[in-house]
Image (cartoon, coloured by chain):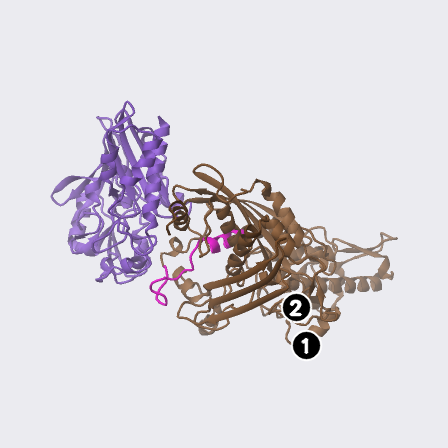
């Protein structure tokens, strides 16, 4: 279970207390869908004006969001697509409304796919209206390094930042141009149909793309930075704490509270800690996560913050441990710490190789036979340290069977501004999953019944909740843009949700490019494509 | 899940005795990929007494008969049909269709008899709504969200579509089934076996098998020279799902002209929908790409789509064109 499971906590705790045993609650799929939150329905209306050269001069967006039985179901957050662009005049009118539908809220990213579904199709239509290639249209209008951001232009989740000067933040480490250009190359954008539906024959191929921007929170502050002290003092920051422990066996135990959500972020974190402590392998790294008895507190995992902020706290703690060990070794070996070197748990003098000690030996002499260090990171609000943001693109190729409405997702190039990637294999696996999840958001209806809302929703298990199967997943190319990020450990950035909002809009735009059918109402389905083709052929809806 | 009892008879006669003893409270248990799900979903209509027929010998085979036809035991796994060289040689259309059923894992468990006789997959029935098939007196599909699991060709009481994929090609092949009854064996055509929602023994079902009868065998007549057949299925995903629409075509050709035709649509009606008007239209005509484009005009004129499923008809027509086009190219 993921989101909205908090309501079950008291019952789980109660049963655990009564039985004296650990309790795990697993709901059947239909019950899980009924009790967990799903993405909300929404309607978006745009009025957009652009100059002939393609620069957007004004935009008004009005949206209506079904927040289910509670307010704040995500309606006011995540509309970062608007703030990805430099638009001199904009207005936003938001309407959240409550209904008897099931619980709504963030699910596989907060309001990304559903809002960018509308926005990215609007951008595609605007590009066509002004006669410019959709990528060039975006290059004209997106924020780039150097763009100045104010509180007013930064969006509803923007808060005062310690780095703010004269009311401005300036984007710097921000690969908005590169993710567009690299995506074009990876997919072969030059093969796109110049005229939508222009290819002859029954099976028509088309290309589409969309952008996504989310969660500047991927870059926060770590202990020791001025921004950290100021943000914590302000009192409303989420603080990620971690503890690192060296024991007498010479093993390093990483204590952190965030459970692994399937992303295997522990491996990425352990790799960094090993590097800081001079290990050439992960053999001495031990992970202890998800147990609040053993780890200091941290917020739940979300928003691409795990490796970045939970991992950052561990990196900082590891740095402290390294200094601590060098000092202890310096005392033991009677050598200046600056003349010592560390490799695979052995500390030795650079000049005299006979002068050595080990991590294990130092731990054995410490109180309790362990050496511990603790550190924290934070981000200053919903969007974090807004000198950069998570940004990505999705470029796709599809094929439409114009006789039956069937369509195939052929290829995808999924591009991310990642900074330095620690473990490319894991990064690719994570992003493959991200693309599959977002594809489902594009192609699957919100799982409640249109005629009997508030009763039971579709309940034929996975036959109604249609996860894409291996037969539906396209050939994928993951493109990682290693943009410069000197402010963080190893130049990393969080990138869990860089491009995650883009696939639905990209697929819709590709289908339009393939066969000329524009699907504005979610989800994309074969029957809508066929109905659209029929309308095009007969002129009748 | 309700409390159940499982019998494991070793002969057909014994199984029929048990079924007769418990009446409509009992059900035949073969692959279990439909029955067990109904039990797990706590459907009122699911049986309490399961008669597991897997211990009965000689119900799982694929063999050629003396006339050159093929007999398939009802307990034959769908995977065995999909992998049969004999069937691939004699009736490739059946193999082609069976390969589109569900997933490889489920085909390892599901049987041919089960595919023919499975319960409908309407989300209201499977969700435990009190509908015609589940002890109630209403069809939620007719008035509910009927985009996928419901008929676009009208209905009587239950509007759920017949979900099986094996029946349409078997009808185009003119296959028959053998049924064991308390008074002996009886034969039906596959078309007679699944006529759509019927009141049988006081309950609504898509087939005519009575509570104390067991489907034992499918018999396909020998293939004729000049026979061409095709099967195409449109489903939401590339695996697992039931048909949004399917088309099974069988053409008997002589010198490029169509002597006889079978056109059966799946996924659009409460039964495998044999479209006789297209069959008549095709007879006597020369098979070519032009004919493929003309044929849909004569198809499904009696369609009666529900609120959300009109496109099923267009999909079925598209599949008809596609199938005829493919068969024309085979020449």
Which of the chains bears the disc numbered 2?
A
Who's the residue at 42% across and 42% down the image? A402
Q: Is residue A443 left or right of residue A235?
A: left
Question: Who's purple, chain-wise?
Answer: B
Numbered tag placed on residue A379 in the rendering: 2
Q: Is residue A393 left or right of residue A29?
A: right
Who's the residue at 51% across and 58% down the image? A118
Which of the chains bears the disc numbered 1?
A
Quadrant for residue A345, please give it: bottom right
Question: Who's brown, chain-wise?
Answer: A
Quadrant for residue A160, please give it: bottom right
Q: Is residue A404 left or right of residue A371?
A: left
- Circle 2: element type: strand
Please tell me whether residue A152 is drawn above or below residue B62 in the rendered image. below
Does the magenta stretch mainly form a helix, a strand or a loop? loop
Q: Position of residue A92 (x, y in %)?
A: 55, 68
Q: Earlier in the sequence, mark 1 or mark 2?
A: 1
Residue B76 visible within the image? no
Q: Which portion, as a residue range, is magenta?
A: A434-458
Residue where numbered disc 1 is placed: A234
Front residue (pair A199, B55) = A199
Q: Position of residue A496 (x, y in %)?
A: 59, 57
């Amino acid at each position: 279970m993921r989101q909205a499971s908090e309501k079950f906590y008291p019952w789980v705790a109660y049963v655990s207390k009564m039985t004296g045993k650990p309790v795990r609650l697993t709901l059947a799929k239909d019950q899980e869908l009924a009790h967990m939150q799903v993405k909300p329905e929404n309607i978006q209306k745009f009025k957009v004006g652009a100059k002939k050269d393609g620069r957007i001069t004004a935009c008004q967006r009005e949206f209506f969001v079904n927040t289910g039985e509670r307010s704040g179901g995500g309606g006011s957050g995540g509309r970062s697509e608007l703030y990805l662009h430099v638009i001199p005049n904009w207005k936003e009118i938001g309407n959240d409304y409550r209904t008897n539908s099931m619980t709504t809220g963030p699910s596989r990213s907060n309001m990304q796919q559903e809002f960018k579904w509308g926005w990215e199709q609007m951008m595609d239509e605007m590009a066509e209206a002004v006669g410019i290639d959709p990528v060039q249209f975006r290059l004209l209008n997106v924020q780039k390094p150097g763009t100045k951001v104010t509180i007013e232009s930064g969006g509803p989740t923007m808060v005062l930042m310690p780095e703010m000067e004269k009311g401005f933040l300036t984007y710097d480490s921000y690969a908005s141009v590169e993710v567009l250009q690299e995506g074009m190359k990876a997919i072969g954008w030059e093969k796109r149909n110049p005229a939508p539906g222009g290819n002859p024959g029954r099976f028509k191929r088309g290309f589409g793309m969309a952008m996504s921007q989310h969660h500047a929170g991927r870059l926060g502050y770590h202990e020791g930075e001025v921004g950290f002290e100021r943000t914590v003092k302000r009192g409303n920051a989420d603080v990620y704490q971690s503890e690192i422990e060296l024991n007498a066996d010479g093993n390093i135990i990483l204590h952190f509270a965030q459970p692994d959500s399937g992303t295997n972020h522990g491996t990425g974190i352990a790799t960094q800690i090993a590097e800081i402590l001079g290990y050439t392998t992960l053999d001495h790294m031990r992970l202890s996560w998800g147990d609040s008895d053993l780890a200091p507190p941290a917020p739940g995992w979300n928003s691409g913050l795990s490796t970045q902020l939970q991992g950052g706290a561990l990196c900082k703690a590891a740095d402290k441990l390294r200094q601590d060990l060098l000092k202890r070794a310096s005392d033991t070996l009677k050598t200046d710490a600056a003349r010592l070197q560390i490799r695979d748990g052995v500390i030795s003098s650079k000049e005299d190789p006979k002068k050595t000690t080990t991590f294990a030996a130092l731990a054995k002499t410490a109180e309790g036979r362990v050496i511990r260090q603790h550190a924290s990171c934070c981000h200053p609000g919903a969007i974090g340290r807004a000198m950069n943001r998570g940004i990505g693109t999705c470029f796709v190729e599809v094929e439409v069977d114009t006789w039956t409405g069937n369509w195939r997702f052929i290829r995808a190039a999924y591009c991310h501004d990642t900074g330095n990637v620690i473990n490319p294999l894991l990064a690719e696996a994570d992003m493959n999953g991200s693309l599959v999840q977002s594809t489902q958001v594009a192609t699957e209806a919100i799982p409640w019944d249109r005629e009997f809302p508030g009763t039971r929703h579709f309940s034929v298990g996975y036959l109604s909740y249609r996860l894409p199967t291996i037969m539906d997943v396209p050939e994928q190319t993951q493109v990682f843009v290693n943009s410069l990020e000197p402010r963080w450990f190893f130049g990393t950035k969080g990138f869990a949700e860089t491009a995650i909002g883009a696939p639905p809009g990209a697929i819709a735009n590709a289908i339009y490019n393939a066969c000329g059918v524009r699907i504005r109402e979610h989800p994309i389905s074969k029957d809508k494509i066929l109905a659209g083709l029929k309308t095009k052929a007969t002129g009748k809806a | 899940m309700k409390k159940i009892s499982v019998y494991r008879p070793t002969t057909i006669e014994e199984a029929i005795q048990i079924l007769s003893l418990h009446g409509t409270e009992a059900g035949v248990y073969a692959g279990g990929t439909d029955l067990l799900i109904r039990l797990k979903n706590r459907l009122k209509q699911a049986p309490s007494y399961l008669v597991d027929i897997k211990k009965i010998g000689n119900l799982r085979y694929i063999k050629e008969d003396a006339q050159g036809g093929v007999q398939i035991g009802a307990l034959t796994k769908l995977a065995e049909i999909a992998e049969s060289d004999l069937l691939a040689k004699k009736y490739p259309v059946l193999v082609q269709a069976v390969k589109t059923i569900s997933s490889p894992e489920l085909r390892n468990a599901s049987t041919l008899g089960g595919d023919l006789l499975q319960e409908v997959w309407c989300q209201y029935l499977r969700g435990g709504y009190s509908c015609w098939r589940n002890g109630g007196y209403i069809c939620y599909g007719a008035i509910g969200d009927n985009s996928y699991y419901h008929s676009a060709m009208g209905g009587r009481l239950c509007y759920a579509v017949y979900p099986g994929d094996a029946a349409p090609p078997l009808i185009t092949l003119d296959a028959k089934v053998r049924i064991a009854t308390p008074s002996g064996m009886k034969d039906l055509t596959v078309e007679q076996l699944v006529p759509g929602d019927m009141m049988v023994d006081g309950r609504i079902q898509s087939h005519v098998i009575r509570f104390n009868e067991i489907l034992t065998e499918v018999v396909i007549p020998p293939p004729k020279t000049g026979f061409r057949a095709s099967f195409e299925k449109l489903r939401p995903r590339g695996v697992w799902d039931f048909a949004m629409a399917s088309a099974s075509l069988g053409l008997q050709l002589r010198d490029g002209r169509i002597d006889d035709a079978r056109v059966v649509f799946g996924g659009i009606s409460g039964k495998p929908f044999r479209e006789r008007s297209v069959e008549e239209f095709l007879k006597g005509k020369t098979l070519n790409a032009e004919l493929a484009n003309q044929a849909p005009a004569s198809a499904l004129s009696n369609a009666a789509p529900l609120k959300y499923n009109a496109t099923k008809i267009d999909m079925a027509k598209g599949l008809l064109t596609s199938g005829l086009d493919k068969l024309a190219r085979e020449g």
